[in-house]
Image (spheres, rainbow, N blue to C red):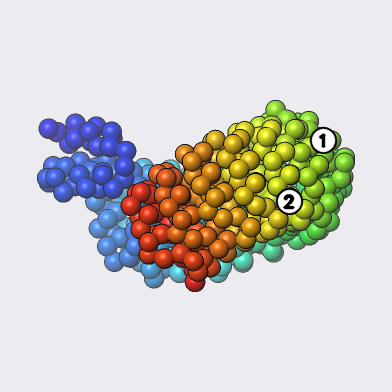
Amino acid sequence: MSVDLLGQVLDRVLERRDRKACRLVSRAFARAEAAHRRALRVLRREPLPRLLRAFPALERLDLSACASLDDASLAAALAGADLGTVRQVCLARASGVGWRGLEALVAACPRLEAVDLSHCVGAGDREAAALAAASGLRELNLEKCLGVTDMGLAKVAVGCPRLENLSFKWCREISDIGVDLLVKKCRELRSLDISYLKVSNESLRSISTLEKLEELAMVACSCIDDEGLELLSRGSNSLQSVDVSRCDHVTSQGLASLIDGHSFLQKLYAADSLHEIGQDFLSKLVTLKATLAVLRLDGFEVSSSLLSAIGEGCTNLVEIGLSKCNGVTDEGISSLVACCSYLRTIDLTCCNLVTNNSLDSIADNCKLLECLRLESCSSINEKGLERIASCCPNLKEIDLTDCGVNDEALHHLAKCSELLILKLGLSSSISDKGLGFISSKCGKLIELDLYR
């Protein structure tokens, strides 16, 4: 068969490991796999030049784990390589790469659409300016690029007007001025993360004019308050996801005004932002009954009546976060899940009043459950987990850290054949016998936490 025909065969092999194994069949298969490979993750810089030449159809290049990568080695690897098909490059934590390497990258990849430079703490305005030469850029992650200022952001805004997804989380040198210019130049923005910045309500005034904006994260923006959320609510955007977690000056009234202006909100993250839920916020929350799918209220003061009201008003929830909430009881969980049968993720971390009765209610009502976090829920035991294992066949993740579970509990959990992540830290009562149950039945497991 020709390389093209073999390539069509490989296109129908969905598992990445199986595709790589096909290289071992014959030289023809190896050539076909190389010609059709779309993604590459490089672990060492030495073979990088050879690899870039061996795979001419690459679209996604991940260099985040490429040890000791620097400007010189990156530029040398890119020289002469045909990277006209590359659209996404990940350089997360590649702290050795600076503006010279990025200039070479942009020049070598004319169709570049997405770059991840997150956690390159030494990256600054010169690196941002180098990336700004990629005029077709649609997605850029500058999280924790601590040297980026308003000047660097301005370069990106002017050079990349088609940006749709942008994060400059933790870039604390960026101010309202930079955000305002960004908004004026990048009108296609759909997702924006300004978390941990010292920006004020004026930034929200500017952001409110982004008509296509769907996702906004502003975690721990301590200078933003209810006035800013009201400005946002009056805007012309179509927000579907908002994260105001750890915004100390936001109150229930501000959240209520935010909801009032965004009737199609699908995800609301308000963890650790206020201690109590006011009636004004609760009444507005009910108006999102048809659309709200994710609600995170971690760290709130709640009651059984409040959880009942949330359940009755938000019947389409697929995720609820109640981590470290005071007042979460069996009665509250029972009334919540009785109305929210679509829940797939439930986070009850450190809700130490929860017992097996809550697990029984979850098992009876949440048949689609995929993720259950129960860290430090010390009042649950193997009986409650037996119900979960029997009634929730789609369970993929469960956190039982510091729950005191035993081998019998693991015997029940072994029924969850779809389990991917199991956390058992601080569980002194489990032994090799219990882990044997898991290893024999949970073949898809990819993460097992046995801390202490």
Is residue 68 at all visible to an observer of this figure? yes
At x 68%, y 34%, the residue is: 338
Q: Is residue 253 left or right of residue 6?
A: right
Residue 102: x %, y % from top left:
46, 59
Residue 309: x %, y % from top left:
79, 37
Q: Residue furthest top?
A: 290
Neighbour tally class for label 2: few under 14, some 14-19, many 20 plus, Cα within 10 Å: many
- Determine the image quadrant of residue 332: top right
Q: Which residue is mark 1?
A: 284
> Mark 1 or mark 2, which has the lower sequence index?
1
Quadrant placement of the N terminus? top left
Type of amino acid under label 2 = Val
Q: Is residue 112 left or right of residue 46?
A: right
Is residue 93 at all visible to an observer of this figure? no
At x 20%, y 44%, the residue is: 22
Badge 1 element: helix
Neighbour tally class for label 1: few under 14, some 14-19, many 20 plus, Cα within 10 Å: some
Q: Which residue is mark 2?
A: 328
